[in-house]
Image (cartoon, helix red, strand yellow):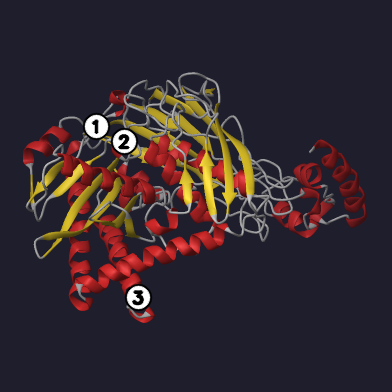
Amino acid sequence: MSIDPITLSVIQSGLQQVCDEMDLTFSRAAFSPVIAEANDRSDGIYSAIDGSLISQGIGGLPVFVGTMQYSTRTLIEMIAAGTAAEPKPGDIYIVNDPYLGGTHLMDVRFAMPVYRDGKIFCWLSNTGHWPDTGGAVPGGFSASATSVEQEGLRLPPVRLFKQGVMDKEIYAIICSNIRVSEQRIGDVKAQAAALLVGEQRLARILDRYGDDTVTEAIAELRVRAAQQMRANCRLIPDGTYTSTAYVDSDGVVNEPLEIRLAITVRDGELDFDFTGSSKPCIGPMNSVLATTLSSVYLAMRHIFPDVPISAGAFEPLKVRRPEGTFLDAQYPRPVSGCAAEVSQRIAEAVFMALVEALPDRVTAAPAGSSGNFALGGHDPERNRGYVMYQISGGGYGGNADHDGLANGCSTIGISKAPPVEIMEQQFPVLYHRYALREGSAGAGLHRGGFGLDYEIELRRGKATASFVMDHGRFGPPGALGGRDGRTNSVTVWQGGVATTPEHLSKAQDIPLTPGDRVRVGTPGGGGYGNPFARNPQDVAEDVRLERYTEEQAKNLFGVVIGAGGILNIEATEAHRQFQAKLYEKAI
C-alpha cells in the first residue's frame, strides 16, 4: 500500500462525512414527517464501475445498504445496455421498481453521476420513504394486494432532472398517480438537494487529495473491510447452523410463511442457504432479491458492528439465490411488506441460527416489526386530503450483558417514530396514550425490552386505516432458555365496538369516522437465558415501575414479592428452585 495510514483514515472519515451531510440535508429540507422527523431515508456513495458501496451515512437505514448498491449496479448495466438513458452532468435518475434492486414502491431512489474531467468518478444515491405512491390504499401498504400494480406507481430509472432542470412532464405523470401530490415537491427537492450537497462536499475531498489518491484509498478500504469481516467470521466455529423464522401470514392466505435458513461456516466465509422456505405467496409479503441480500448483510452488521460500511464487508458473505421461494419475488408479485417486515424475519433467522455459536455477540430476537400504520382521508377543517404514516418501535432482545432496550427502532433501521405533537399538528388525530407496553418483554436472565402501546382517535372527517405489521401470531423468540416476547396486537373501535383483524397484524381499508380509535401494542423483545437466574432485585424494580405485575414476577421469574413491594427472599428462593426444575423439563 502506497497511501499512508493517516491519509487513509482521513479520507475514510471524509467520505463518511459526505454521506452524513447528505442525510442531514435530506431530513432538514423534507416536508413529510416520515422523512423530516422519522429519518426514513439513507444516502451513499457508489462505484462508477459496478455500483458497489463505497460509503453510507451513519444515520441511514441499514436495510438500504444492500438495496442501493444493487439498484446502482442495475442502473449502470441498463445504461450500458441502452435500456436507460445516457447520463449527462446534472442528471438525476428516479426509480422505485422493486425488481430492479429496491424494496417496496414507497422507497423512492434518486441516483446522480459525479463527473471529474468529463468522466463519471462515482454515483451518489439516496432513498426516501414517500408517504404515498398511489395504489389501492393510502400509504401503499395494501395488506391484501395480489399484484404490484395494486401497491402504487412503479417507475423504471428515468431522468427526473436533466442537466439540473426538473422534467415537468415526468413529474406531472408522478403527481397524477399519487395522493396529496401537491406536497411531494418538498420531498423531491430535498432529495435532490441532498445529492447536490454531497457532490460539493465530495469535490472538496477530491480537490484536496487528488482523484488518484482517493481512488486508491477507496480500493484499500474495501480490502480492509473484507479482511476485518473474515477475521470476525472466524470467531464462529466451522459447521452448519440452522433456524426457522415465521411471518404471520401474507395478508391474503391466513397461514404462516416459513423462512428456513442454514448457515455454513468455513474458514472465515459464511454461506447462507434459504432452501425449504415457503413458496412465493399471493399477498404482499414477498421479498425481492435485493432486500433479501440486504437483510443478511444488516444482520451481520448487527453482530459485527465494528466492520466499516463498505462493499468489502459483504465479500465473505455468500447468499445463495433463494429461487422458487417468497424471498426471491418476481414480477408481478406484490412486495409492500418486504422491506419493513420480511427483512426483519430474515435478520431474526440469522440471529437465531448464530446465537449459540456467538452467545456473547448475538441477542435474542428483537420486536422485528416496523408497525406500518397508514391513515388516509380528508380533513374538512383544512379542506385538504392527507396520508398519515406511523412507524413504531418495539423491544430489543436481551443479550449476554444486559436487558434489551425498550421501545427501540426496528431491526432494519435507525429511524424513529415521529413525535406525537407533530402528528397531531399535521393530521386530524388525537393520541390517547403513548407508553411502554407493560408485561411485553420476554423473561430471561436478561429480559427483553418492552414494546410500545399507543392509541389514536380520528377527530374529524372520514378516513380509512391500513396496516402491515408482523409478530402477531408468534412473539419474538427468546434465546438460550429465555422466553418469547409478547405478540403484536391491534384493536379497532368503530362506533364503540372493538374488533381484532382476521390476520391479526394486517388489514386494509378499515373505514373510520370521528370518535373511532385504533390501538396498537408492539412486540417486546425475546428474553436471554434462564429467567429463574435473574437477579430478584432487578425483578422487584421492574414490578415497582409497573413493568410487570407481582403475579408475572412470580410466574415468569420465580420471584415472590410481598406486601408493599418487599422481597420475600426465603419464599423467593424456594419458589425459584421449584419453578426452575419445571422450566428445565419444559425446554
Q: Amino acid at mark 1?
A: Arg
Instruction: Please tell me which residue is depicted at 54% across the width and 63% down the height of the picture.
Output: 231
Nearer to us of marks 3 and 1 is 3
In 3D space, how far apart are the residues under numbered discs 3 and 1 (Cα atoms)?
Answer: 41 Å
The answer to whether the residue labelled 2 contacts the one labelled 1, judged by CB atoms less than 8 Å apart, is: yes
* Label 3 crowd (10 A; few <14 / some 14-19 / many >=20): some
Residue 584 percent location from the top left of the image: 83, 42
Instruction: Please tell me which residue is depicted at 54% across the width and 40% down the height of the picture.
Output: 522
Residue 76 percent location from the top left of the image: 21, 46
Q: Is residue 563 above or below residue 520?
A: below
Q: Which residue is mark 1?
A: 154
Q: Quadrant of the C terminus?
A: top right
* Label 2 crowd (10 A; few <14 / some 14-19 / many >=20): many
Residue 502 percent location from the top left of the image: 52, 20
The answer to whether the residue labelled 3 contacts the one labelled 1, judged by CB atoms less than 8 Å apart, is: no
Nearer to us of marks 2 and 1 is 2
In 3D space, how far apart are the residues under numbered discs 2 and 3 (Cα atoms)?
Answer: 36 Å
Residue 146 has which mark?
Answer: none
**In the structure shown, which secondary structural element does the residue marked by tag 3 occupy?**
helix
**Left or right of 293 in this view: 535:** right
**Left or right of 574 in this view: 103:** left
Q: Which residue is mark 3?
A: 8
Q: Which residue is mark 2?
A: 98
Q: Amino acid at mark 3?
A: Leu
